[in-house]
Image: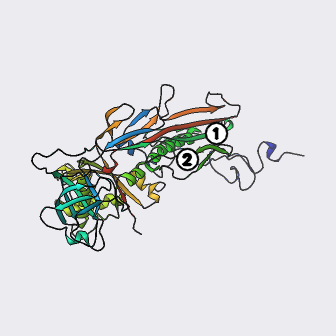
């Protein structure tokens, strides 16, 4: 028996004197003549393709808020009430006579409620565009009913006491009047305030890899969402887990709600842990509960200036609230462009109706069609696209939230823990921390890899944890733009 081709080379493979391909000197996987390797390896790009650009959606809270530690399981604050006495719902007690002078202050469900209007005060009662000034002669101590007489007519207007018994009368106090030598005002009004609280939730995530896979080297060149570039080994997935977790920290503060249903939390074994889901109040929930919600806006209405007139509805509402001059608009792309178009039609300066807003319409200072700021009435608005509302894997997947208006600056509130008034950003995060443990953003490693040998399991576990909540103070100055149309 003899060796084919001298026995030095596999059958069908004959060396060539030069680096050139011939029909007998290359390996063919498909031909089955060399099935465990290739002479000519495929060309591999080691740099990862950034097909989605910067995938992180966080930074909103970093722009408009702050983070502060707390040691308790709950944060409590109070907000001042309105200075003047006013009520949204009232009615003339009897609906079948114009001569009845009795007013009843009502709560939201239509029942009589206690109030702070006192005898000898002068009030304004209005319905729509009609208003009447009246004098409060007496207040029934038991029922709270007001015996109030119009100053310039014998009776209340017929529209105030229509057969439908309207409950949409509005009342506010503007002064008082006493006779000579009379006694002083009866009773006093305590300062009104509202108490709010929120509790932190524990947010966790983990990255896991077994020990054997950490020994299989495969470098990937990446550019991180923070702009840095370099190579990552098996920690490429850990890096993305951390980025995702950091996004979850912000998304939870934006989206979270307090649980009103009983939902059990199970432990790792699938058993009831004895704890229930508590939830926490996020930004959207706080605005919907205590703030302003603007539904079905159409700033890009192309018929005249109706889009701008619709925006003026916001200004009128801000006048009724804190009237904070500087506000930031965080919008999705569609709403941002609609405001650009609204402003361009309202100002004919420049080619194509371009307006430069707070730049004093200087073409040299801001020559672009994307408005970064504008002034309307006594308010300055600075707007930007909010990536969270545009990303296809977050709120860009839904169509109900179009943006949010956030007041700039700080609010003065009474801190129950410190026992004094303090200034805080309207929007800020509180996280659990003490001298023993800081739970703002905690990371630790367990397992057989990474130098911290705390387990006999051959793996590396990177744990991430945070315990935090969001404080939305002065929520009446926030506006949530929603789309409820079909």
Q: Where residue 380 sits in the image (x, y, percent)?
A: 23, 50
Quadrant of the rendered structure where residue 138 is? bottom left
Up the image or down, 384 lies above or below 224; here it is below
Residue at screen point 49% across, 55% down: 393
What residue did someone put label 1 on? 209
Q: Using the image as rendered, state which of residue 449 and residue 58 is in the foreground.
A: 58
Neighbours of disc 2 within 10 Å: few (<14), some (14-19), many (20+): some
Q: In this view, does 419 lie to the left or right of 183?
A: right
Residue 242 vs residue 430, the one in the foreground: 430
Name above or below for residue 441 compared with residue 173.
above
For the view shown, which residue lies furthest in the left direction? 180
Q: Which colour scheme is used?
A: rainbow
Please tell me whether mark 1 sits on a helix, a strand or a loop. Answer: strand
Left/right placement of residue 177 relative to residue 374 reads left
Q: Residue at x 43, y 61 (%)?
A: 399
State the residue position of label 2: 277
1 vs 2, front mark: 2
Residue 436 seen from this side: yes
Seen at 64% across and 51% down, the residue is: 21
Q: Quadrant of the C terminus?
A: bottom left
- Above-or-below relation of 328 to 163: above
On the image, the x and y values in percent for residue 313 come to: 25, 60
Nearer-N-terminus badge (1/2) = 1
Q: Return the residue found at the far top.
A: 435
Left-right relation of 441 to 112? right
């Amino acid at each position: 028996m003899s060796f084919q081709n001298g026995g030095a080379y596999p059958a069908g493979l004959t060396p060539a004197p030069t680096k050139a391909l011939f029909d007998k000197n290359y390996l063919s996987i498909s031909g089955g003549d060399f099935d465990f390797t290739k002479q000519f390896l495929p060309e591999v790009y080691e740099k990862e393709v950034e097909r989605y650009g910067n995938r992180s959606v966080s930074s909103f809270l970093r722009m408009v808020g702050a983070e502060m530690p707390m040691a308790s399981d709950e944060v409590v604050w109070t907000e001042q009430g309105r200075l003047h006495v006013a009520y949204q719902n009232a009615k003339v007690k009897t609906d079948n006579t114009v001569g009845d002078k009795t007013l009843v202050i009502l709560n939201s469900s239509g029942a009589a409620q206690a109030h702070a209007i006192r005898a000898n005060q002068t009030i304004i009662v209005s319905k729509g565009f009609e208003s009447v000034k009246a004098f409060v002669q007496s207040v029934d101590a038991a029922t709270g009913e007001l015996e109030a007489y119009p100053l310039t007519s014998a009776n209340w207007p017929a529209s105030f006491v229509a057969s439908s018994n309207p409950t949409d009368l509005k009342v506010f106090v503007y002064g008082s009047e006493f006779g000579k030598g009379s006694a002083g005002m009866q009773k006093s009004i305590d300062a009104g305030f509202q108490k709010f609280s929120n509790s932190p939730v524990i947010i966790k995530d983990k990255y896991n890899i077994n020990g054997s896979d950490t020994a299989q080297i495969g470098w990937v060149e990446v550019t991180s969402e923070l702009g840095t570039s370099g190579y990552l080994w098996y920690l490429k997935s850990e890096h993305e887990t951390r980025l995702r977790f950091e996004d979850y920290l912000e998304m939870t503060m934006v989206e979270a709600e307090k649980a009103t249903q009983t939902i059990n939390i199970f432990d790792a074994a699938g058993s009831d842990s004895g704890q229930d889901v508590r939830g926490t109040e996020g930004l959207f929930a706080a605005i919907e509960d205590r703030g302003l919600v603007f539904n079905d806006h159409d700033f890009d209405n192309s018929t005249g200036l109706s889009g701008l007139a619709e925006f003026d509805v916001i200004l009128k509402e801000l006048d009724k609230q804190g009237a904070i001059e500087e506000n930031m608009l965080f919008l999705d792309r569609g709403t941002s462009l609609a405001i650009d178009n609204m402003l361009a039609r309202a100002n004919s300066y420049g080619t194509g109706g371009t307006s430069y807003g707070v730049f004093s319409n200087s073409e040299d200072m801001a020559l672009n069609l994307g408005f970064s700021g504008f002034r309307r009435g006594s308010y300055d608005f600075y707007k930007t696209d909010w990536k969270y509302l545009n990303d296809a894997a977050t709120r860009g997947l839904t169509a109900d939230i179009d943006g949010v208006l956030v007041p700039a600056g700080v609010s003065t509130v009474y801190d129950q823990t410190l026992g004094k008034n303090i200034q805080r950003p309207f929007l800020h995060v509180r996280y659990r921390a003490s001298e023993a443990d800081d739970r703002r953003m905690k990371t630790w490693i367990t397992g057989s890899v990474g130098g911290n040998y705390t387990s006999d399991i051959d793996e590396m576990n990177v744990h991430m944890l945070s315990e935090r909540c969001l404080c939305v103070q002065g929520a009446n100055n926030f506006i949530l733009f929603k789309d409820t149309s079909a």
